[in-house]
Image (tube, rainbow, N blue to C red):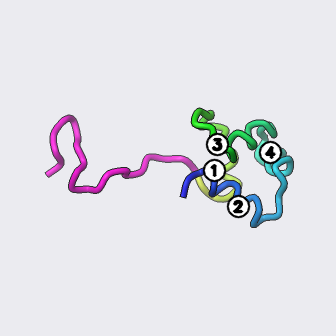
Amino acid sequence: MNIRDFVKGQRKIHGLTQVDLARKAGVGLRFIRELEQGKRTLRMDKVNQVLQLFGKTLGPVDWRPEENAVINGKEKE
């Protein structure tokens, strides 16, 4: 699941409009609209403000299978 779908889904589960969510998170309505539309460049601090309302935060995640991970140009052993 991506952030866009998560935020939109959580907003609907909690019965919030985009305006409500923007107000509660302390961000602008335009930011919420762009987030839910999947804009590829957003400020991480603002994304975290929104995610924290739902008990989440941005952070590093594994994006490759463990056996294919490369660290400092060398395959992980």
Q: Which amino acid does label 2 sit on?
A: Gln
Residue reaching furthest to the front: 37
Is residue 69 left or right of 16 when viewed as pictured? left
Q: Residue at x 21, y 56 (%)?
A: 67
Distance of label 3 from label 1 (alpha carbons): 10 Å
Question: Which residue, given by chain and number where applicable, does mark 3 sit on?
Answer: 47
Reading the chain from its start, which is encountered first: label 1 or label 2? Answer: 1
Question: Which residue, given by chain and number where applicable, does mark 2 sit on?
Answer: 10
Q: Which amino acid does label 4 sit on?
A: Ala
Residue 22 at x, y = what percent?
80, 45
Distance of label 2 from label 3 (alpha carbons): 14 Å
Residue 71 at x, y = what percent?
23, 41
Question: Which residue, given by chain and number where applicable, does mark 4 sit on?
Answer: 22
Marks 3,4: beta carbons within 8 A: no
Question: Which residue, given by chain and number where applicable, does mark 1 sit on?
Answer: 4
Q: What residue type is labelled 1?
A: Arg
Is residue 9 left or right of 23 when viewed as pictured? left
Reading the chain from its start, which is encountered first: label 4 or label 2? Answer: 2
Q: Quadrant of residue 39?
A: top right
Q: Quadrant of residue 16?
A: bottom right
Magenta residue check for 60: yes
Q: Which residue is drawn at 80% across and 50% down?
A: 21
Secondary structure found at label 3: helix
Distance of label 3 from label 4 (alpha carbons): 11 Å
